[in-house]
Amino acid sequence: FPVRYPSHGKHVEADLSRQVIALARGGKVERIYPISSGKPSTPTVIGSFRVYTKSPGYNAKGMYFSNYFIRGYAIHGYASVPPYNASHGCLRVPIPDAISIYNWLRVGNIVDVYP
């Protein structure tokens, strides 16, 4: 996985074309996880954002261990994570991966999302 933004330090890169996120520290990838991003009618926002709040456990929408990065969009665990864009704009990850991602990310970490 080629890191596009090594200058962003400890950050997440979401490659929507491959439906994966990479947890990176500088230019080195530490972990890669499968995701399901936003479907065409509710696309995931593209750009560079920062985690602004975190929410452990489940919420009313079935989101698990959420890391919010802009306007209610989050990296979060979810029961259904097909290998294509199917969410309402969030970056869904498999339930078993959600806690380790949650524990790795901190408020203020950058989330880079690209097509």
Image (tube, rainbow, N blue to C red):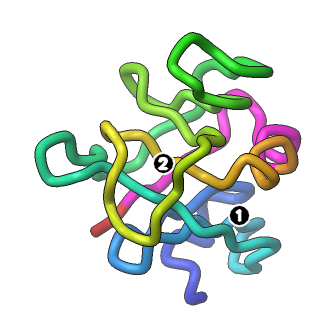
Could you give the CA–CA distance between mark 1 and mark 2, rounded to whole angstroms? 13 Å
Front label number (1 vs 2): 2
Give x and y (percent) for residue 61: 51, 19
Q: Residue at x 51, y 34 (%)?
A: 74
Q: Which residues are magenta?
A: 101-113
Q: Nearer the viewer, residue 83 or 15?
A: 83
- The extreme front residue here reads 79
Q: Is residue 58 above or below residue 21?
A: above
User: Quick check: 64 left or right of 75?
Assistant: right
Q: Is residue 107 magenta?
A: yes
Of labels 1 and 2, earlier in sequence is 1
Q: Secondary structure at mark 2?
A: strand
Dividing the picture into quadrants, the one containing residue 9 is bottom right
Label 1 secondary element? strand
| On screen, residue 11 above or below 6 | above
Q: Which residue is mark 1?
A: 23
Q: Name the residue: 67% across, 54% down.
A: 94
